[in-house]
Image (cartoon, coloured by chain):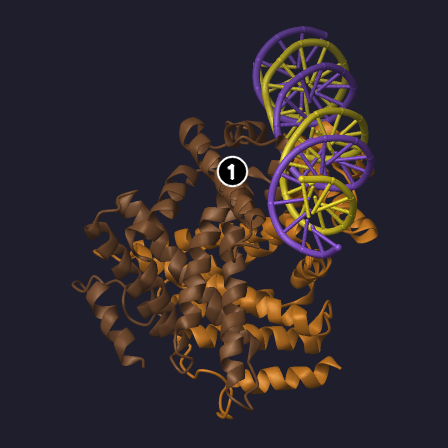
Chain colours: A brown, B orange, C yellow, D purple
Amino acid sequence: MPDLLSRRELNKAATRQAITDAALTLLRAKGPGNFTVEDIAASAGISRRTFFNYFSSIEAALASVTHGFLDSALQQFRLRPANEPVLESARAALMQLADPMTVAPLAELFTLTQENAVLSRSELEAWDHCTEEIISAARERFAGTPGAVVDELYLRALAGSVISCGKAAMDVWFAQCGADLSPASLVVLRQLLIDAMGHLGSGFGSPVPAASPSATSTTATTHLNKERL
Amino acid sequence: MPDLLSRRELNKAATRQAITDAALTLLRAKGPGNFTVEDIAASAGISRRTFFNYFSSIEAALASVTHGFLDSALQQFRLRPANEPVLESARAALMQLADPMTVAPLAELFTLTQENAVLSRSELEAWDHCTEEIISAARERFAGTPGAVVDELYLRALAGSVISCGKAAMDVWFAQCGADLSPASLVVLRQLLIDAMGHLGSGFGSPVPAASPSATSTTATTHLNKERL
DNA sequence: GAATCAACTTGCGCGGCGTGCAAACTTGCA
DNA sequence: TGCAAGTTTGCACGCCGCGCAAGTTGATTC
């Protein structure tokens, strides 16, 4: 009993990491769908069977990257003060993650995964899982206020929308910037996240339509977001 | 030669239908994961290989139900006037579908699928696919107005949120009403859809029922508990 | 340290999946 | 009628995902 983390736990964590590393390496080298579990196992120095002790499929192994990202997003969300509006908490939580270290793995996975149906399935699952977690977190928050009846529809609609907007921002970012992780690119990402939350906070009211010539929505919506507080 | 639909097309449609019917029947009888492609093929009177000519997996075959539902939702959406606000179009489109005939298959699939991770994966894919379609539809709509620069973020965030809210309404409905397809239950569903779109349109402004006795959502959901019984 | 037990790894086997291929069979059309 | 194009089917193959039982490794106790 030397450490808080026993040798066993360390080994497991290391193995898990080795698997995802191997999977990512192979994904880079061969492209999606062109390698097998056996390849990953060999590359990670374990048996095929052991792979399945950790992940139920190749996609699951790769999706752990997304899970990691979303988990830390959730962690940030939970750190926000309970009396803060949910939208603002979400915005702040996402903001924390728009730094190179955190975003880089996800960005790479996106670029390697894009245009591949099989893989993106697990990605969808990861985002959905995160939605459920946010629902839980928000429910706990509301449950703190005494006598309140938690409106399940409100919770689920809100959480789902927040996630959708976060995802939309990511999608647009990848479409525009590719795997570019430069500071300028990350500024764009942050702004997209802010804008998306702004749209959501303002009920998708004005921004886009037709005639209005100027206002690329970037500047317009940030203010809206601020007013909503 | 005789018909607009050739014999070939009719046969294909019939086979496709036979497959999904067989899959649903087996799902009802044995539960998710407890039957094979071979079972479906036998039950549909075709070979295992032919099954794979139509669907790439059992889940895909079952998800065709969801696809059908969402496709008709999309069709309704496209029928709305182009100058109408997107949110209103979405609300109206979803409203059209809250009738027994349309909702029944989806409801059953939900109840049979719930609590099963493997199946819900394909469901997620179906919803995601619908999101992409809505993005296309909305883009076309905006592109119709000359000189407009279509804001991709706005589009994707909005479409994703609309779908999320629709899904949230469905989830809450199933959780509360189960597979109940009575008129009263469908009224509840309609109200949930309206409320969800309302939340979205108001930027999720009135946080949570809590103290505020106002608004549609509170009344709708409380009625619901009564009727549930 | 030796004994012990729980946790983890590994090889094996098995049924099922998804697909390329080539040989039948069906439909559309001249 | 006969040919061209489209469909179904059986076969074979590699891979997947998991149960099982036998090893191996890490922690605990005396």
Q: Nearer the viewer, residue B169 or A34?
A: A34
Q: Nearer the viewer, residue A28 or B166?
A: A28
Q: Which percent across, then down, holds residue A86?
A: 41, 75
Residue matched to label 1: A19
Q: Which percent across, then down, holds residue B107?
A: 68, 62
Q: Residue at x 19, y 51 (%)?
A: A184
Q: Is residue B213 above or below residue B19?
A: below
What is the chain identity of the residue bearing mark 1? A
Q: Nearer the viewer, residue B14 or A106?
A: A106
Q: Is residue A184 left or right of residue A209?
A: left
Q: Nearer the viewer, residue B86 or B123?
A: B123
Q: Is residue A122 left or right of residue A185?
A: right
Q: Residue at x 35, y 66 (%)?
A: B83
Amino acid type shown at disc 1: Ile
Toward which corner of the image does residue A225 lie, by quadrant?
bottom left
> Does the image show residue A201?
yes
Q: Is residue B68 above or below residue A43?
A: below
Q: Residue at x 47, y 72 (%)?
A: B197
